[in-house]
Image (cartoon, grey):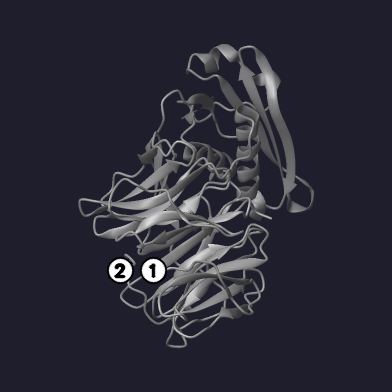
Amino acid sequence: MIKRVRNTLAVLACLTPLLAQAELTVDIVGGGANRYPLAVPALAGEAANRTVSAVVKSDLALTGMLNIITPPNAEMTVATPAAVNAGVWRALSANAVLAGSQLPSSGGNTRVTFYLEQLAPKKTLAQGEFDVPASSLREVGHQIADQVYQALFGEKSFFNSRIAYVLKQGRASYQLQIADVDGQHARTILRSREPIISPAWSPDGRKLAYVSFETQKPVVWVQDLVSGQRKMVANFKGSNSAPAWSPDGNRLAVVLTSSGNSQIYLLDANGGAPRRLTHSDAIDTEPDFSPDGSQIAFTSDRAGGPQIYLQPLAGGAAKRISWQGAYNVSPRFAPDGKSITYMRREGGRFRVVVQDLASGDARVVSDESFGESPSFAPNGRMVLFASEQGGRSVLWASSPDAASKVRLGVINGEVQDPAWGPFNP
């Protein structure tokens, strides 16, 4: 029988969105080799809290692809490309420097400018200007970091995406929260005296599906993140669990026990009659759609122990894809559909694995004693998961090659069931 790592109990929901009392803090604990050396001084004229430059540095460090150089002198700022002395910054081993300024603007706004200056040969790789209220400076930092990342690596970053997770505080306090990818701006969308499980993002990032026991049985709900309104979409006989969205956002895959054992069904995202997808005498659970919508990955114990399978939606036999280890669960596709992440139990420990689907090669990307609920960043460059540390649960993010890793520590609480959302709408 497949067991959840955490028991699921009744949920008593409070629907009013509230600001979270706990926020995550980023701690860089590992980095890959051959990282690009980028100097990020404070912006000229930046306020004492240096919100913009701090967000830029935090975002870029999260990737593990850059070596962020902070100048030894806090007053070493460069407002314009003309002010960049290549020799000075090259002496600090930088290949590029982020220049810019932050100055008061009309109507109480703040004008922020930035320039990404390559040092040899000297060239402006990216630039921009923002005129915003002070409350939007963190968002400006995310946007600058994204433009820097795209200029250096030629692809979109994950800095403007969000994460969802369940925060446990005390013995009987659970909150379903969403937050910026760096853990800031955490907001509670559902509060409970009992556990909440299995949050799943809609493809457009506007809704969350999750499982609630508030009616004394597991039921799947979908909640709008703007209005807070929610709808019961799967409340059939027996258990209703493990929701997963189709890529077009029109359908949900859910796990129902209406036939006696756990099987995977498809239904309209607004509810309706389910259509059975898997047909086995085993436990089939934890579905996840491939990015092209042609198949699902899921966990099944049809071979005697829990393993990962692929099932075509058009019909046909399921194919087992995990062959190392006797216990593999919780599959999630990479955004490009070329790899998959899941959990493997080894010697009593739960490790996060990333497997290439073409070759079958699998790599362990976590070295903690416990890994839970892995999911990819929307650009596929990092894998988010929960793990135990010092008897508590915290969030981690690792590159798929395990070369770099960051810890998202939680203040006064434990994090469970993390899910990385899509690019922000």
Say what secondary structure mark 2 lies in: loop
Which sits in the foreground, 221 or 405?
221
The residue positioned 69% from the left and 55% from the top of the image is: 425
- Can you see residue 186? no
Towards the viewer: 1 or 63: 1
Q: Quadrant of the N terminus?
A: bottom left
Q: Where does residue 143 sit, x and y in percent of width and height?
A: 65, 43
- Identify which amino acid the numbered label 1 is placed on: Ile
Q: Nearer the viewer, residue 145 or 138?
A: 145
Q: Quadrant of residue 250?
A: bottom right
The image quarter containing residue 233 is: bottom right
Residue 160 can be seen in this image: yes
Residue found at the very far left of the displayed protein: 347
Q: Position of residue 107 (x, y in %)?
A: 78, 53
The residue lying furthest to the right in this view is: 106
Q: Which residue is mark 2?
A: 1
